[in-house]
Image (spheres, coloured by chain):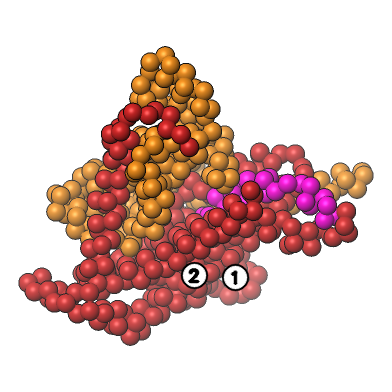
Chain colours: A red, B orange
Amino acid sequence: MEARFPGHRLLPYILIFPSIAVIIVFLVVPFVQAVQQSFYRTSPFGTTTLFVGLDNYAQLFSTPEYVRSLLTSVGFAALVIVGGLAASLGIAVLVTRRIRGVGFYQVAFIWTYALSPAVAGIIWALLFDPAVGLGTYVLYRITGYRINMLVEGVPALLIAAAAAAWNMLGYNICFYIAGLQNVPREFEEAARVDGAGPWRTFWRITFPMLSPTTAFLLFVNMIYAFFQVFGLIDIMTQGGPGGATEILVYKLYRDGFIRLRVNFASAQSVVLFLMVAAMALFQLRVATRRAVYSR
Amino acid sequence: MSRKTLYKVGLHATLLLILIAVAFPLYFTFVMGTLTHQEAYAFPPKLVPGNQFFANVTEAWHRVNLGRLMANSALVAVAVAVGKIVLSVLAAFAFTHFHFRGRILLFPLSMITQMLPLPVRIVPAYGLMASFGWLNTYYALIIPYLASTTGLLLFRQFFLTVPDELSDAARVDGAGPLRYLWNVLIPLSKTNIAALFVIEFVYMWNEYLWPLIVTTAPQMRVAQIGLKMMITSERTAAEWNIIMAGTILIMLPPLVVLIVMRRQFAQGIAMQSTK
């Protein structure tokens, strides 16, 4: 690409300076400090600081509550991502089946995107409230089982995951509709002419063509299910009952800001970073592979 | 009816059923917000709206000072959305219209912002706010959010599609780069600006964890934290009718922004998904 305004040597630096300053001061510096803190231990009154190497990490992975929180987090994210994306893709496929009103359905489903995780949490807490919840009532009439998410762990985790997947439906459906509209019809028609049924055509042609959209949504939903869902958990269960919904970000918050174990919390931050980085690189690889194809 | 129409009717019917199922929790929320305390605890649960909505809203409004909380949220969400638009337009302009060494930064910057969400830096970030004296101020709620990769990539993508002839013509006419940006590029970017505004307004209005830790003074709290205050402020049985009336109010602004600007938003999404 040619410079469209040659001769302005300083100006581009001035233009990018504000963005870079924000990123360095509020993103990079605190992250570097978190890495640093994770190698130290501070005495309870903050008077002395001791270098402890990887001790905080060793302690982390030998603490049963942390290991449990890690497993809870992974299970919760898997439920939200797999359940949510499967439902969204199914709905998006129906919407784009050569019928009128695609625009209508797009708007009709998108609104869950405007609800915050905390709002989704409060709505589903109402729906499954042991006393007034309609979900509780319907489930009781059908199965005779009185679900109580304030007392039982597994139902609490499942309801929280359902609320989270519901919250992301609008966003996911919108992206899948856009992705499906970008899949050239000729490929599907060619497959059909060759005698492939709709099921085979979908899995062999359409779904692989959607892989950049899927990779992008995997990343966004993972960030959602690991981090942004904090408000939902804080409103619905506060990590309870008995730690059953204490996902990593909630444990980090409790250790860092309630129990004030700063170094321990920073080690948790670094572990989270490693997960995000791996996921971001994975997404990047899928995205660039597509770019090579399309040339 | 021919097979084809039958197929179409069946498809629409299926979609409408799914739509009703997805919207049902919202409907139940609304109904609950219109009931009296006694009606809320009726068994089986009521499915027809009552007439207490305004009484419940008023009660919720006074109980957690919702007016102030929502004003704070509105101020912060608008400031962040506008700030992000400005910063990312400027950066995208630099990355697309100039030949300078800093251009190699584009890719690392976008990766860094993606890889450093709040939880991976939360404890030192809080310490930074404390050392700046920014706890319980709007600065803490606005400034750390201002860099946006989404915006940078969105505008970059768009600026690359603007034909060179326009900037050539501007140069021939003696217009400098900033004049060209302001008079030509920005008017052309209206849809992108609107799309980014929706995305960032909704995002910021819905932020929870950071406002929870950097504000403790009641007059600096935001609407999302109001939700938490409503469910923890009660005494005996949860007053779901009042909580849900407050919830409806709190969810309304981003919903309205999204619905009013849905077209621009959809175009923004289409742009993002083809990048």
Q: Is residue B79 visible?
A: no
Task: Verify CB contact (< 8 Å) between mark 1 and mark 2.
Answer: no
Which residue is tagged 2? A76
- Seen from the viewer's position, the closer of residues B229 and A194 is A194
Q: Chain of mark 2?
A: A
Which residue is tagged 1? A140
User: Magenta segment: does it hold B188?
Assistant: no
Q: What residue appears at the point 85 percent right and 60 percent down from the top-left corner?
A: A196
- Seen from the viewer's position, the closer of residues A11 and A111 is A11
Tell me the amino acid under the disc marked 1.
Tyr
**What span is in magenta?**
A167-192
Q: Chain of mark 1?
A: A
Tell me the amino acid under the disc marked 2.
Phe
Q: Are marks 1 and 2 on the same chain?
A: yes
Q: Main secondary structure of the magenta part?
A: helix
- Image location of residue B234, percent across then percent down: 32, 58
Secondary element at image label 2: helix
Closest to the camera, between mark 1 and mark 2, is 2
Q: Is residue A185 visible?
A: yes
Mark 2 surroundings within 10 Å by alpha-carbon count, few (fewer than 14), some (14 through 19), many (20 or more): many
In this rendering, position of residue A292 left or right of residue B53: right
